[in-house]
Image (cartoon, grey):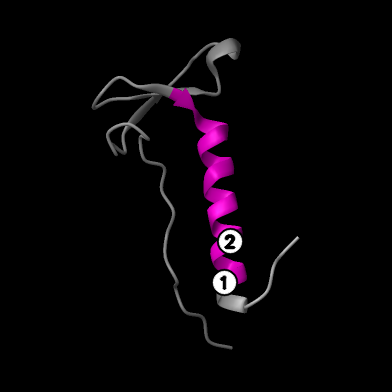
Amino acid sequence: MSMTKIGTAGIKCPKCGGNQFLQGNTPEMEDQISCISCGNFFSLQLEIDKMAKAFKIRTAEILGKELD
């Protein structure tokens, strides 16, 4: 069986595209990350969910069918 690398995923700041972050260190802020470049705060889980949705759509396009 051969495998082909089709790409990688990385989280980028939705405001500036930065890729270095600080994560909250309290339970209330655990899901919040702050972009080092611009200071934008956003939800880590929301960005992961967006990436998962985009991955699912792209995989369906490649396979030629909708995935549930």
Residue 40 at what x, y percent from top left?
Answer: 34, 22
Looking at the picture, which amino acid does disc 1 mark? Glu
- Residue at the disc numbered 2: 57
Placement of 17 over or under 43, stated as above or below: below
The quadrant of the image that shows the N terminus is bottom right
Placement of 67 over or under 20, stated as above or below: below
Residue drawn where x is 54% and y is 11% of the image:
26
Q: Which is more toward the observer, 62 or 22?
A: 62
Furthest residue in direction bottom, as rendered: 1
Looking at the picture, which amino acid does disc 2 mark? Ile
Residue 21 at what x, y percent from top left?
Answer: 35, 29
Name the dominant secondary structure of the magenta segment.
helix
Residue drawn where x is 58% and y is 50% of the image:
52
Please tell me in which quadrant of the rendered image residue 6 appears: bottom left
- Residue at the disc numbered 1: 61
Q: Secondary structure at mark 2?
A: helix
